[in-house]
Image (spheres, grey):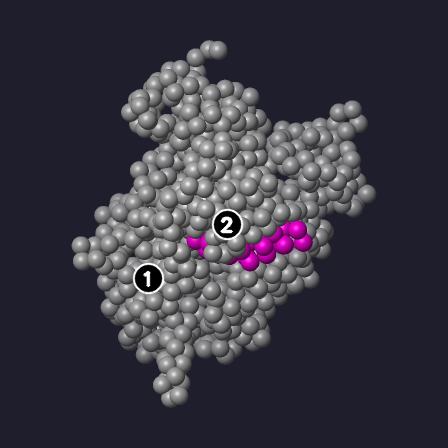
């Protein structure tokens, strides 16, 4: 498993722990249920904390806790299950979450583009993924028609810009 | 019609390059079929019974002459000289080789076409009214908003891995030719008391294993907010639609399970939030830009008096039938809408040879402002033909075996490819349609019977829209033998209805006789001017049940 | 494709589609592929059928074929016939276009 953050391949920084695992020192990502039952003690650890949401766990459940969380990991049980794309957009666009949104699970190269556009800034990927593959996948399309969680200008806004420039050019003549 | 600008071109070209790389990786063995399958499906490439099948998107069913000529050229160069127009207004090639597909996509891109989102669990090609821009009572050309939706839905990052496929249809007239109530989302363009244009939204319609009629959840969504509203519907569905069972994952099941009111509540809540951000607000200048592409062509000021036409009709019985059945009223005096039947007697519904495509392209160029339409009933339409040119159009169509005067009659049937081509089918569909067509070939008899729509599907997935045929036929497999189940009373228009099952299924041999009996019961029962569907609605299924299964 | 592997089938052949062009192929006794059902190896009994299916694996791994599966056949008058309507159509071509598919290209195809 490799970790890509904002386009850079980096070392694993968080330890993902299960429901009953002993907590190691340092940064951890815990399942939602564990967060919900052990919130108070987890917060007092004074180490970065992340929560992992399964496909059926709506991010509304951690909305009020986001200030405590360095990472929200969203699971793709299978690449075809695209629920987490909407979860990521809610975290970014609706809840204004600025921490890390990490894609975990069945995260495949042909989906990187969609994930980045929906606001994922960290992807846990297969070992075979290289920086070239990542670049190629995320850069598959120069333009995007629709507004999403990234700051890419939409085709619509580019058209408006072109039209305005054409208008200025006409006015200058 | 809409023309690509540099941005549209760029996206389609990059997609072709991406797929070219993926095909090369697959052929080189760098990726397995398991990894490749979802990729090829997202580019409209299926594996069918005999070979691959490539589905080309025809956005809202509109094609230019140049595009149709290109489709003909591809059919000759890379396929077997024909194509199949589908109930989703698309075109399918039945025999392409995987190695040729990137080249085919290049050819398509050169005429602003592609196979993007013609498969997969994403928002599919938007469908609309084949009479767009020509119908008399149209609120606004439905293709304007269809094009807006096409762009918004293309490679939508959030909605490319939905629980299941998603189909949107748009209609802008009272008469519904786009079957909007059997789509995941149906959009009815309306005008309010203040004269503003907005949209009624139906959700949760669909056919397949569990046919459902869409429920209205939006009464008047303002024009500028349409994308925000659609995004709200999609998000509610993407987060809450079932993913545990393939057969329960369409939005119709979600709407059915939580109820239309709850669906409406959730959508309204999401819509209010999205609207607040303003990110999806449709700017007027972009709407104006797209609208300009669908402005009226340069119609001439003509009168509806057409002495030449009357004389030609009087002189030629075949032409007279064709004018009656295959043409429709146009919004401009002196013009007519021409429907080209792809249902020759005994033929394959929706099939069109490359030579026929060239003929139609030539006619569209010469007589209909260079464009044509594909209908969801698997026919073609020339939307703007001068009445004075009807005879010339008819003669040219007749020479190409395209002048069958049966639009909306009993031989104008919808049929899916069925077991002759399809990997999912349980039974054949085309031979059934052909046999019925041959039985009812006589034109006088067809006229006497009047409007009657027979739809045939070769399996429960209902690509042949059997649930909404006045007579619906569903092929089933019983221990290796093809049987056909009949439904009556379905309808896909503004009075959408799902057909009722008549009774036990028929064998291939018995089915045509059963259809003959059904027609006879209708003819014996009908009152003045009643169409089949009117009679059925009046008398119900009982008289049919009682008489069709009687011993011979 | 499991639905085509009838449990009680006595005689079975193996079919798949060629990766590069999608053409329907059958596995022959000599370990090569043929476009004609008449060349197919017919496995009698469950064990032979399983062995036949296993022999498709190298072709899949070499990216020559996709979606291999077994289907029921019967031998009559020296010919091999598919039992189901589906496989009968598959080895011949569309019943509505006799000018297309194997029926137009090969001898020994039965309609």
Pointer 1 residue = B227
Q: Is residue B222 magenta?
A: no
Magenta stretch, main secondary structure class: helix
Q: Residue at x 40, y 74 (%)?
A: A159
Q: Quarter of the image containing the N terminus of chain B? A: bottom left
Asked if A127 appears above or below C85 in the picture, the reply is below
Label 2 crowd (10 A; few <14 / some 14-19 / many >=20): many
B183 to the left or right of B474: left
Q: Which residues are magenta?
A: B52-77
Name the residue furthest bottom: A172
Give the x, y percent position of residue A74.
40, 64
- Number of other residues with Cα within 10 Å of mark 1, as a class: few under 14, some 14 to 19, many 20 or more: many
Q: Tell me if I can see residue B250 in this picture.
A: no
Q: Chain of mark 2?
A: B
- Closer-to-camera residue (C33/B470): B470
For marks 2 and 1, the one nearer the N-term is 2
């Amino acid at each position: 498993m490799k970790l890509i953050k904002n386009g850079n391949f980096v070392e694993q920084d968080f330890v993902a722990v299960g429901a009953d695992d002993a907590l190691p020192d340092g940064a951890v990502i815990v399942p939602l249920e564990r967060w919900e039952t052990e919130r108070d003690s987890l917060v007092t650890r004074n180490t970065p904390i992340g929560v992992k949401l399964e496909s059926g766990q709506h991010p509304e459940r951690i909305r009020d806790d986001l200030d405590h969380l360095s990472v929200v990991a969203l699971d793709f049980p299978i690449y075809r299950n695209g629920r987490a794309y909407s979860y990521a957009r809610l975290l970014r666009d609706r809840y204004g979450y600025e921490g890390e949104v990490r894609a975990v699970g069945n995260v495949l190269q042909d989906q990187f583009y969609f994930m980045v556009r929906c606001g994922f800034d960290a992807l846990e990927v297969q070992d075979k993924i290289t920086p070239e593959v990542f670049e190629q996948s995320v850069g598959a399309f120069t333009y995007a028609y629709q507004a999403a969680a990234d700051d890419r200008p939409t085709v619509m806004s580019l058209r408006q810009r072109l039209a305005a420039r054409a208008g200025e050019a006409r006015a200058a003549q | 019609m809409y023309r690509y600008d540099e941005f549209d071109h760029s996206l389609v070209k990059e997609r072709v390059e991406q797929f070219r790389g993926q095909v090369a990786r697959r052929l080189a063995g760098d990726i397995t079929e398991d990894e490749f399958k979802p990729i090829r499906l997202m580019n409209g490439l299926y594996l069918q019974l005999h070979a691959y099948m490539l589905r080309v998107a025809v956005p809202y069913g509109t094609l230019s002459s140049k595009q149709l000529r290109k489709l003909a050229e591809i059919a000759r160069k890379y396929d077997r000289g024909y194509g199949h127009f589908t109930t989703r207004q698309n075109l399918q090639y039945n025999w392409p080789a995987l190695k040729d597909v990137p080249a085919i996509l290049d050819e398509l891109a050169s005429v602003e076409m592609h196979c993007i989102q013609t498969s997969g669990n994403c928002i599919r090609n938007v469908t609309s009214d084949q009479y767009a821009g020509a119908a008399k009572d149209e609120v606004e050309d439905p293709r304007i908003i269809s094009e807006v939706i096409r762009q918004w839905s293309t490679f939508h990052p959030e909605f490319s891995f939905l629980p299941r496929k998603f189909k949107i249809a748009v209609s802008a007239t009272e008469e519904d030719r786009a079957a909007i109530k059997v789509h995941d989302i149906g959009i009815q363009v309306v005008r309010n008391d203040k004269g503003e244009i907005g949209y009624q939204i139906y959700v949760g319609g669909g056919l397949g294993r569990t046919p459902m009629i869409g429920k209205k959840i939006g009464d008047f969504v303002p024009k500028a907010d349409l994308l925000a509203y659609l995004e709200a519907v999609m998000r509610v569905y993407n987060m809450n639609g079932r993913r545990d069972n393939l057969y329960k994952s369409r939005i119709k099941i979600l709407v059915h399970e939580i109820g239309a009111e709850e669906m409406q509540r959730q959508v309204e809540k999401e819509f209010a939030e999205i609207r607040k951000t303003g990110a999806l607000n449709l700017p007027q200048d972009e709407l104006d830009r797209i609208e300009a592409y669908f402005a009226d062509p340069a119609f001439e000021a003509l009168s509806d008096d057409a002495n030449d036409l009357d004389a030609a009709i009087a002189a030629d019985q075949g032409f007279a039938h064709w004018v009656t059945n295959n043409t429709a009223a146009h919004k401009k005096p002196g013009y007519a809408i021409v429907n080209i039947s792809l249902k020759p007697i005994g033929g394959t519904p929706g099939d069109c040879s490359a030579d026929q495509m060239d003929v139609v392209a030539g006619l569209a160029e010469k007589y209909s402002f260079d464009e044509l339409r594909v209908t969801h009933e698997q026919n073609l339409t020339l939307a703007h033909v001068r009445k004075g040119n009807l005879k010339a159009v008819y003669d040219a169509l007749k020479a190409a075996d395209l002048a069958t005067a049966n639009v909306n009659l009993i031989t104008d049937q919808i049929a899916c490819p069925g077991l002759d081509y399809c990997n999912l089918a349980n039974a054949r569909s085309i031979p059934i349609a052909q046999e019925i067509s041959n039985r009812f070939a006589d034109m006088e008899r067809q006229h006497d019977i009047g409007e009657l729509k027979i739809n045939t599907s070769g399996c429960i997935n209902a690509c042949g829209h059997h649930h909404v045929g006045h007579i619906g036929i569903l092929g089933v497999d019983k221990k290796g033998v093809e049987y056909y189940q009949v439904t009556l009373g379905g309808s896909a228009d503004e009075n959408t209805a799902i057909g009722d099952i008549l009774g036990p299924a028929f064998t291939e041999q018995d089915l045509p006789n059963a259809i003959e009996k059904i027609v006879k019961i209708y003819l014996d029962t009908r009152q003045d001017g009643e169409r089949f569907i009117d009679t059925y609605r009046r008398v119900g299924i009982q008289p049919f049940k009682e008489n069709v299964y009687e011993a011979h | 494709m499991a639905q085509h592997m009838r449990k009680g089938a006595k005689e079975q052949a193996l079919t798949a589609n060629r990766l590069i062009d999608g053409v329907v192929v059958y596995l022959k006794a000599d370990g090569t592929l043929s476009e004609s059902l008449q060349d197919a190896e017919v496995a009698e009994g469950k064990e032979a059928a399983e062995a036949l299916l296993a022999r498709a694996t190298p072709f899949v791994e070499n990216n020559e074929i996709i979606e291999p599966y077994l289907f029921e056949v019967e031998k009559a008058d020296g010919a091999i016939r598919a039992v189901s309507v589906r496989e009968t159509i598959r080895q011949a071509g569309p019943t509505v276009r006799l000018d297309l598919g194997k029926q137009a290209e090969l001898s020994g195809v039965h309609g």
